[in-house]
Amino acid sequence: MLPNSCLPANSICSAAAGIAGNVFALVLFMSPILTFRRIVRNQSTEQFSGSPYIYTLLNSLICLWYGLPLVSPGVIMVATVNGVGVVFQAVYITIFIVYASKARKLKMLGLSISVLVLFLVMVIISLQFFDSHSRQIFVGYLSVASLISMFASPLFIIKLVIKTRSVEYMPFYLSFSTFLTSLSFLAYGLFKADPFIYFPNGIGTILGIIQLALYFYYKNVSTVHLREPLINSCA
């Protein structure tokens, strides 16, 4: 329990960390815009994958629900950032469906509906079968599991960078924004004494540091011997 004299400073610091996290997350949410400009221009989804946007939508919905006062009073910054994330992912998925082939269109529609149904079931269960304290714990564990599952992508990129000795598939601005977002919400969670926020973002911060360290280590390494990419371009 913090002394009363420390409460205003703690509130100011947590608000600052939350606002910073929202700003840095906005950069991440906007990063696929160039990809979707290409999709619209070419009127085709080409070889791009829509799965990351489905996974991010589910993650944003779960974390949005966790950040709402009905579940976790006092961590509204979690709700605002994930509310913005839901809007961005919904727009990306809609564009993808419009320009995808018939088979991929049906697959994306099916996945989108499944995500919404899953989220609705989670909301109903958390409201009907848990009191306020248990609800926060239930949704909190789901949000942690969802966030940690999102770290599969950075782990793959880290492995690829080490294997190819190239940072071609790990853009600096994206890695740096991811690191800053995780760091901001790590601080926000610590100020709020909320392990469901600081634990997954602590993992994200560590992975961000590793990505940045690898970037600076390998950015000047010659990769002339790589005649072609090892993976297809996807987002």
Image: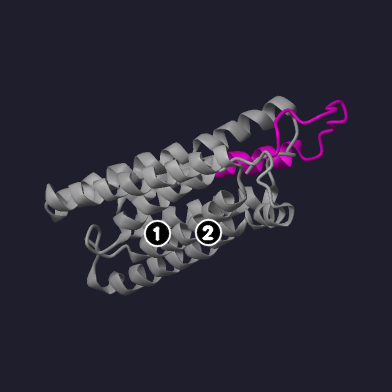
> Which colour style is shown?
one colour
Front residue of 216 and 84:
84
**Which residue is identified by label 1?**
188
Q: Is residue 101 magenta?
A: no
The residue shown at (42%, 39%) is 148
Q: Position of residue 64 (x, y in %)?
A: 35, 57
Q: Which mark is residue 91?
A: 2
Q: Secondary structure at mark 1?
A: helix
Compared with 91, 5 (above or below) is below
Which residue type does callout 2 highlight? Answer: Val
Query: Which residue ends up furthest to the front in the rendered image?
Result: 102
Precedes in sequence: disc 1 or disc 2: 2
The residue shown at (32%, 59%) is 67
Q: Which mark is residue 134?
A: none
Q: Position of residue 10 (x, y in %)?
A: 34, 67
The residue shown at (47%, 40%) is 150
Specify few, some or many for label 1: CA neighbours under 10 Å numbering under 14, 14-19, or 20 or more: many
Front residue of 167 and 39:
39
Q: Nearer the viewer, mark 1 or mark 2?
A: 2
- The region drawn magenta spans 208-233
Q: Horizontally, is 89 left or right of 77 in the view?
A: right
The residue shown at (23%, 57%) is 71
Q: Position of residue 52 (x, y in %)?
A: 53, 43
Q: Secondary structure at mark 2?
A: helix
Q: Image quadrant of residue 86?
A: bottom left
Compared with 130, 167 (above or below) is above
Q: Is residue 218 magenta?
A: yes
Marks 1/2: CA distance?
28 Å
